[in-house]
Image (cartoon, rainbow, N blue to C red):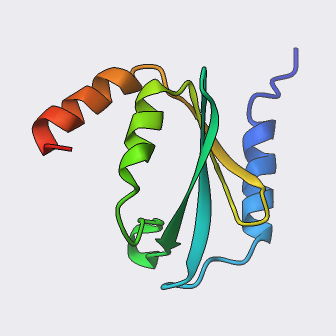
Amino acid sequence: MRDDSAQPRALDDAVQSSRPAPVDGRRITMNFAVTGGFGTQTFKARMRYEAPGDSWPSEGPMPSDFLSAFEAGGLLTISDPAGRKLAGFNLRGAEEATQLMRRVCGL
């Protein structure tokens, strides 16, 4: 029996290596769509690439209504300005996490 478990990872690595690396300080507006029983709410956040940590932190806080949508949502989808999906997250447990953030951080 052939083991193909490593093949998707190799393909992902090949796709990633074919893209140019982001430039430190590059800014982009990302779309955060929260979907739940209320429909879909979309929020925009300006992100800045930081090469040392290979990360994209937000340049400012998300609006307060994002936290409410996050708390009640079932799925968070992040996409680039062209609408290409970058990541999707199941929001199971988000309600408890949001309540804790509100209590501890005073949000």
93 in relation to 82, above or below: above
Q: Position of residue 5 (x, y in %)?
A: 75, 28
**Residue closer to the observer: 40 or 3:** 40
Total numbered labels: 0
Residue at 61% from the left image edge and 78% from the top image edge:
22
80 in relation to 43, above or below: below
**Residue closer to the observer: 53 or 88:** 88
**Residue closer to the observer: 106 or 25:** 106
Q: Residue furthest right?
A: 1
Residue at 81% from the left image edge and 38% from the top image edge:
7
Q: Position of residue 62 (x, y in %)?
A: 40, 56
76 in relation to 43, above or below: above
| On-image quarter of the C terminus | top left
- Please indicate whether residue 42 sits to the left or right of residue 93 in the image: right
Residue at 56% from the left image edge and 24% from the top image edge:
74
Q: Position of residue 33 (x, y in %)?
A: 62, 44
| Residue 97 found in image quarter | top left
Residue at 48% from the left image edge and 75% from the top image edge:
48
- Please indicate whether residue 76 sits to the left or right of residue 92 in the image: right
| Residue 71 found in image quarter | top left
Q: Position of residue 77 (x, y in %)?
A: 63, 42
**Residue closer to the observer: 86 or 44:** 44
Q: Residue furthest top?
A: 1
- Please indicate whether residue 33 sits to the left or right of residue 67 in the image: right
| On-image quarter of the N terminus | top right
